[in-house]
Amino acid sequence: MTIQGTIRDGLVVLDEAVHVPDGTRVSVFVQTLNQRGLSVEEEVARQKAALAELLAIPDENPNDDFRAEDKDQVLY
């Protein structure tokens, strides 16, 4: 069973009323949010979606064999 809640004044306040017998051992998983308010899983999904968008951009010069490693020879 997964029960969600929020920490308020050092106590776990559950989102909904659930009967759990006294003495029942529980585990608490702390889900931290980043600056955007996203969980780690949501941020990874956001980054994967952004990368997929970039990868979907068509290559405008498919026959261009210039590599990033060659830039020093051109610039200097």
Image (tube, helix red, strand yellow):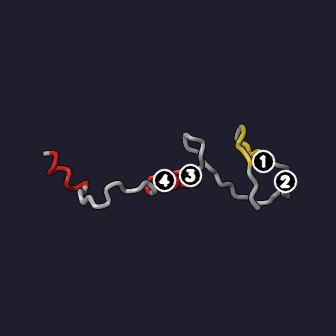
Mark 4–mark 1 Cα distance, whole angstroms, equals 38 Å
Which residue is under mark 4? Answer: 53
> Foreground mark, 4 or 3?
4
What residue appears at the point 46 percent right and 54 percent down from the top-left corner? Answer: 51
Tell me the number on the disc at residue 14.
1
Q: Secondary structure at mark 2?
A: loop
Viewer-side label of 3, 1? 3
**Cα gap from disc 4 to disc 2, whole angstroms:** 42 Å
Determine the CA span between mark 2 and mark 3: 27 Å
Q: Which circle, 4 or 1, is nearer the viewer?
A: 4
Circle 2/circle 1 CB separation < 8 Å: yes
- The label on residue 18 is 2
Labels 4 & 3 near each other (Cβ < 8 A):
no
Quarter of the figure with residue 29: bottom right
User: Dot 4 lies on which element?
Assistant: helix
Precedes in sequence: disc 4 or disc 2: 2
Three-letter amino acid code of the residue under disc 1: Leu
Residue under label 3, please give it. 40
User: In the picture, which quadrant includes the N terminus?
Assistant: bottom right
Structural distance between the alpha carbons of marks 4 and 3: 20 Å
C-alpha separation, residue under disc 2 versus residue under disc 1: 8 Å
Q: Residue 69 or 63: which is nearer the viewer? A: 63
Asked whether disc 4 touches disc 1, contact meaning CB atoms under 8 Å apart, the reply is no
Q: Residue at x 52, y 54 (%)?
A: 49
Camera-side residue of 5 and 65: 65
